[in-house]
Image (tube, rainbow, N blue to C red):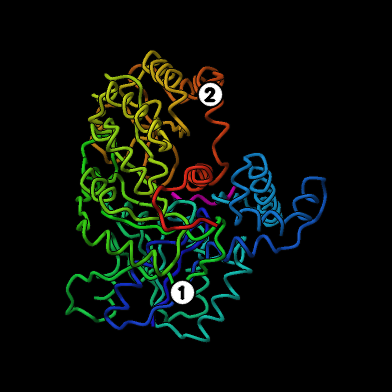
Amino acid sequence: MLLLIHPPLTKPCEPPPGIAKIKGVLNHFGVKVTLLDANIEGVLHLFKTSVELKDTWTKRASKNFSTHLASLKSFSTYQNLDRYKRAVNDLNHLVEVVAHAQGARLSLTNYHDEKLSPVKSKDLIKAAQNPEKNPFSPYFKNRLLKILDHHQPSAVGFSLNYLSQALCTFAMVGWLRQECPGLKLILGGGLVTSWVKKPGWKNPFMGLIDHLVAGPGEYPLLCLLGITNHKNSSSLPDYTPLPLGEYLAPGFILPYSASTGCYWNKCSFCPERAEGNPYEPVPVEKVLTDLQTLATQTKPVLIHFLDNALSPTLLTALYSHPLHVPWYGFARITPHLTDPDFCRALKQSGCVMLKLGLESGDQEVLDSLNKGINLTEASQALKTLKRAGIATYVYLIFGTIAENYASAKKTRDFVIKHCDDIDFLNLAIFNLPVYGPEVEKVEAKNFYDGDLSLYTDFLHPQGWNRNQVREFLDKEFTRHPAIASIIRKDAPFFTSNHAPFFVIKSQRPVNSNFSLP
């Protein structure tokens, strides 16, 4: 029997797609698999931990805990942004207080340790050597003991995708290594894949981790379990063993990947390109069949496409074969999104929001980044989507190698001009991949003294360094009234994962048999 674990800490609003996908494939080959979403369970455990009621905020948050938790599972909460923010901020405060008492800094969506860094292998090993110091240790010790006693797994696999999970993952690994020294421990996931694909990679975890798995994990796991005579399986992800009613959302969110990699795969800063990850789409017919079957099984209130970018081919198929369930995901800005008929059809199919990686409002910067985006086209797409009733979550990156202060002002002006057409904004400061092609063009300098770091700081060739970028964002970009009004609409902590619920409340798919709560 194999135990697959999704460790803390990620957004606790939807189930982990990685371990569900692996379970679906392993089910097909007769492998017994137990799933543990230690993230949602761990967060709920922190909520129930008693805290010292020192101040008014903590007293209020503790008193209203049950009400707040229930409110995030009610659709009516998302009709009142102030009520939503109060619930989320109070719950987050409780997590912060519990963690602070144990010497850590936690939020609902992130983990930070003052003494240990997730980009240093030696610190991850320290986390494994001292699992009792992890704020989630009271939870995972008892939970893992019960699973080990009941299921007696021969191997345990961890899905490590984000830096915010790394210290918790290694604390759990360390505890298992102490308690069950003969148990086979396997580490995979997106972050592990990026580590292993770094040039000159040398495994620093020998003796602690038995196997590191880069890329999709289902078939390497089958081989590790001695099942070598297999072909690619078309199995569905299996979410049924997970606590589907516990996630912090007004119903079940169904995550689904219709592809791996990116069909564009040309952006100069793209980690997919730097890591050499190929684009592999799931056949459109299978995507539609999968989603219909999964929707029948799980009764989702929302489908979350996890793709780097939904291809125009898939978008066309989705509007031709409506899902009758609200959905959202990333899309590239292409001529399709300037077509009113196309966008209205997407809306009819259930599309409530598209995330758009615009990155810059300066055409020269976009061309330098090889984004393949025309600003005139982007302008028309935003207006067309707005008229069709599809919300947009626009992503911008400041401080790229090609950008300067004048370029950043053009981005500000573009957003101001389109403030009525943009529903949400994500603002980021550029991080340079340590092994991407762009790193050779600048003088790099480390963010952190860490052997596992995937990004590096650099001296900007035009003097547009991070401190200047931060000052611009703080004093000139976010303070403009038109932009500030967009930023205020963002969901704290959960951001784009909860944003669709603020749209669905008044924009239900037309001709849909799917009923919202």
Q: Foreground: 218 or 113?
A: 218
* SS for dot 1: loop
- Where residue 444 sits: x, y (%)? 34, 31
118 in the magenta segment: yes
Label 1: few (<14), some (14–19) or many (≥20) C-alpha neighbours in 10 Å: few
Q: Is residue 69 left or right of residue 274?
A: right
Q: Amino acid at mark 1?
A: Pro
Q: Which residues are magenta?
A: 113-119
Q: Foreground: 269 or 488?
A: 488
Residue 451 appears in the picture as rendered: no
* SS for dot 2: loop
Residue 295 appears in the picture as rendered: yes
- Where residue 375 sits: x, y (%)? 29, 22
Residue found at x 42% / y 46%: 450
The residue at which mark 1 appears reads as 241
The residue at which mark 2 appears reads as 478
Q: Is residue 332 left or right of residue 133?
A: left
Callout 1 touching callout 2 (CB < 8 Å): no
342 in the magenta segment: no
